[in-house]
Image: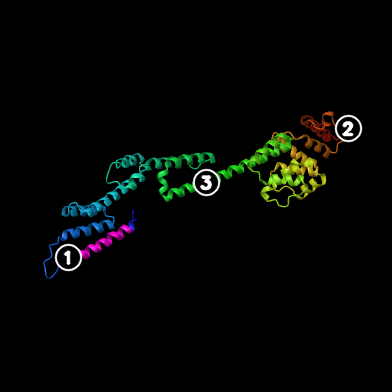
Amino acid sequence: MPDRISIKVFFRSLAFVLAVVLLSSLAGCSKRRAPDYDSRKGQALLDICNALADDKNAEASQAIEVFEQLSPGNDFAMEASLIVQRRLQSIRIQQFLDASDYDGLRTYLQSFQLSSTAGSELLSLNDLPDALQALTLFRAKMPWETSQSLKQALEELELRCDVLFQFPSWQRFLNMQLDDLARLKEKELAERIRQWLVQMQEAVATGDQKEFELTCERFRAEQPDHTFFAYLEQLLAGTEPSFRPRSMTPFFHLALAALWDVLPSGFRTSLATHNPPQEDSDSLAAHIVATRATASPKLFQSLFTELQERNLQPAPELIQDYLLALGLNRLELPASLRSPCPDFSSFSDFLQHITQQANQGTHP
């Protein structure tokens, strides 16, 4: 269907042609008398064209009625009448849309199914009310909290909105939703990675090798190319990673903490010394690395306090390192703390005991 501007140009051009024809007919011929011309028809045609060009539907209807009385069954009048009817139908449809009256719109469109005045464009909109109702319900649930809920809602919406694909604004709306879906997926992935980082750090801190490996498997299954796995391989190969963005530093410390006991002493200490935790870091792995590298009783006390706050029991390796950092003779330790896997409860009791004695100025 021509757009509004081309329709205006068409009818104004037609009005000009009709005016020329009217003047020519009035000029007649000097040798024989021309048949009488009914100027009312010409005027009615001009009125129809001008009214249609100016979107004056009521005036166009009146002019068409006059013309039909003067020229019954005229094809031009019938076409002009259809144009007016479809314009009025479009206006009525827009009124339903503005009021979000989808039930009314559905009834209105269904009334044209057997009508000869309904064009193919109008009949193609029969599914529009249901589509718009589905779209309204979709928008009422925005913003979406999870990518899964948005993905499912989009799939259901597209099934009901085929009729909307003819409108450019619908495709723009869909693209915006797909962008939101991508952002939600990215946000959710970042949160899963954060949780994996926490879980692996806690597994290293407690010496839970099985939990560490299971979490690594889940992590690698979704992010096989993550830098963390490159750090593990490079450290095991005795190579210091040459490039570490700030965002990857916690993963570097985690890799170093996880492999601490299998790396050469000088290599791991050098790495820890040259890669201290960032000042604003809350990385448990970084705390473990700094503590084990310096063997500082003060850092051990801080680390064990953090573990206690997290309701975590430190790994036996950490307890052994803490005992060494205290400079105690092995023979001075109770039997429960001389084993390769010292008991944390026994260690806590022993630490409390020697602290009390130190405060009293006596030796254990």
- Direction from residue 65 to residue 233 in the image, left or right: right
Mark carried by residue 180: 3
Mark 2 neighbour class, 10 Å CA radius: few under 14, some 14 to 19, many 20 or more: few
Secondary structure at numbered mark 2:
helix
Q: Is 31 located above or below residue 212 in the figure? A: below
Residue 236 on image: x %, y %: 76, 44
Q: How far, Cα to Cα, is label 1 from label 2?
A: 131 Å
Mark carried by residue 224: none
- Direction from residue 33 to residue 254 in the image, left or right: right
Question: By what rule are the colours in the image chosen?
Answer: rainbow
Viewer-closest of 43 and 248: 43
Q: Amino acid at mark 3?
A: Asp
Q: How far, Cα to Cα, is label 2 from label 3?
A: 64 Å
Q: How far, Cα to Cα, is label 3 from label 1?
A: 67 Å
Q: Amino acid at mark 1?
A: Ser
Viewer-closest of 145 and 39: 39
Secondary structure at numbered mark 1:
helix
**Residue range of the region highlighted in magenta in the rendering:** 6-27
Label 1, on which residue?
A: 25
Secondary structure at numbered mark 3:
helix
Label 2, on which residue?
A: 331
Q: Quadrant of residue 309?
A: top right
Q: Is 279 located above or below residue 141 in the figure? A: below
